[in-house]
Image (tube, rainbow, N blue to C red):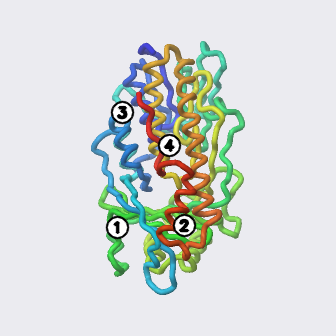
Amino acid sequence: MRSGGSVAVVGGSIAGCAFATVAARAGADRVVVLERTAGRLADRGFGLCIHNDRAAELAAAATLPPGIAAHRLTRRQWVVRDGASATGTLFWEQPFPFHSYHWGLLWQGLRDATPDTVEYRQGAAVTGVTGSADPAERPEVRLADGTAERPDLVIGSDGYRSVVREAVSTGSRPQYAGYVCWRGHFDARLLDALGAGPWPADAVTTVCFPGGSCVVYRIPGPAGTRVNWVLYAPPPADGTLRLDDPTSFPPGRLTPALATGLAGLLDREFPPYWGRLLALTAPEDTVVQPIYDLQTPRTAAGRVLLAGDAATVVRPHNTSGVAKALQDATAFGAAWRTAPTWDGLTTAYHTTRTPAGHALVSLARRLGRAQVERTPDWSTLTPARAESWWRDVLAGVPDIGGQTLPAP
């Protein structure tokens, strides 16, 4: 497609920065990012991982900027409480070829790589988008301040509670998966207080218990290494959380009842070492949210397309969220180079990214069933049985972490 035109990117986090950069480099006359948050996005301190192969592909496509701090991981250790040892029984170890990142540092690297020509507006809350099946008609983006934008193309990168999604896939809403996710992080120097044996720096540990599991790993931080953990379990029994609509208790809003419930879970189900480790997390660095997923029938329509979690909500078990968002941006760039029109661009994007998103949702659902909803008797698993169980869950998929990018 020839250079020119205007692009509005709704949402300025990781996917938004990546799409804005691709659009500007492709030659759009104007790119504006509309980010509802007025504060510092870089303050978001939770961790994430990118598979080494996906990172290499994204770096080659110039979608993942160089120089962003990352922590190398090579193995995943699975442990279960045994009633005897502080650290539990290690029943399986598998390769884990990933690097971990700090969300804020990764976002900052993507933001710094955004060309100066991009207009990045914070505190710009979008209330709705009106699209049209007519490829000649520009969509309208309505903002909370009463103003509107009429760009040539709208990119919805506004997350799992997307307001842009309605313009592409009417009525599509994330569905509750039946369990919740706790997240936390803390300064890795606090590990010294535990006094137990060493925990390898290159290892991800999965703590297993009936009806759930918890993944623990190190990430880089603004002031040194941090420990990041993600725990999946049934919802609190006291009805504290709303489960009919995507929601969460963000950092700093963990209630005493929720904190007590988490402490009880750690005491009942975790090997003592790992329970004490998670308890090092300050309440202000702890989050709980219900798990949802969503598989939209389309990721683009008319002159509106969806990116990242706005297009597909994938349970975190697949460790593919950021890689998928950056792959979306890469596919968008490829569509821009080859499509002759705006309609051709969105059609090409939909053709490649919709099935990719559906495959990720399906795998993550299988992973959720296996690691939370229908957990095996972890104490009976040997390395051979665990390997067989894992292959059955993957069902032919080579690995978690996302799919290989198609050749350009």
> Which residue lies at the image location 46% right of the left edge and 77% below the top edge?
89
Left or right: residue 285 compared with residue 60: right
Circle nearer the viewer, 1 or 2? 2
Query: Which numbered disc, 4 or 1, marks the residue that appears first in the sequence?
Result: 4
Q: CA distance from mark 2 to mark 4?
A: 32 Å
Q: Amino acid at mark 2?
A: Ser
Q: Amino acid at mark 1?
A: Ala
> Which residue lies at the image location 34% right of the left edge and 41% below the top edge?
56
Residue denoted by label 3: 61
Label 2, residues with CA under 10 Å away: few <14, some 14-19, many ≥20:
many
Label 3, residues with CA under 10 Å away: few <14, some 14-19, many ≥20:
some
Q: CA distance from mark 4 to mark 3?
A: 29 Å
Left or right: residue 232 compared with residue 53: right
Quarter-of-image position of residue 190: bottom left
Label for residue 213? 2
Residue reaching furthest to the bottom: 84
Q: Is residue 53 above or below residue 207?
A: above
Label 4, residues with CA under 10 Å away: few <14, some 14-19, many ≥20:
some
Q: Of 371 and 15, which appears nearest the observer? A: 371
Residue denoted by label 1: 188
Residue denoted by label 4: 37
Mark 2 element type: strand
Query: Which numbered disc, 2 or 3, marks the residue that appears first in the sequence?
Result: 3
Label 1, residues with CA under 10 Å away: few <14, some 14-19, many ≥20:
some
Q: Of 344 and 28, which appears nearest the observer? A: 344
